[in-house]
Amino acid sequence: MGATVTQRSTSTDSTVALKDAVATKHPWNVVVWNDPVTPMSVVVIILRKIFQYSNAKATKLMMTVHNEGRAIVWSGEKDTAEAYCVQLHTHGLHASIEQDS
């Protein structure tokens, strides 16, 4: 994931190296994992509390966790993903972060 460098000539014929201003970043995903202990209703409450999700969205994510074993519940900057992961752990959920590919 390196920046592309291009060359351009200025009106004074000197060459200027330019880097692309926006390098593509891959977001970090917060993943909640299924566990046999935490009741589904509690997972919904935790997702609503931490992420401010609607009941419908939190329920949909909880069902994905239940049926598929995991769900990506948030994506974005690494620091924020880490903080959300800690909050989920504090509430007793199994969670991790992974970089999107």
Image: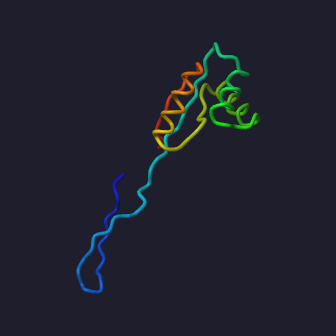
Residue 21, image x, y percentages: 40, 63
**Residue at the image position 57 percent from the left and 26 percent from the top:** 88
Q: Residue furthest top?
A: 37
* Above-or-below relation of 37 to 6: above
46 on left or right of 24: right
Residue 76, image x, y percentages: 52, 44
Q: Residue furthest left?
A: 14
38 and 69: which one is in front? 38
Name the image quarter holding residue 40: top right
Residue 67, image x, y percentages: 67, 26
47 and 28: which one is in front? 47
**Residue at the image position 70 percent from the left and 17 percent from the top:** 39
> Colour mode?
rainbow
Residue 86, image x, y percentages: 51, 27
95 on left or right of 66: left
How many labels were placed on the picture?
A: 0
**Residue at the image position 67 percent from the left and 24 percent from the top:** 43
* Above-or-below relation of 10 to 95: below
1 and 94: which one is in front? 94
Q: Residue furthest bottom?
A: 11
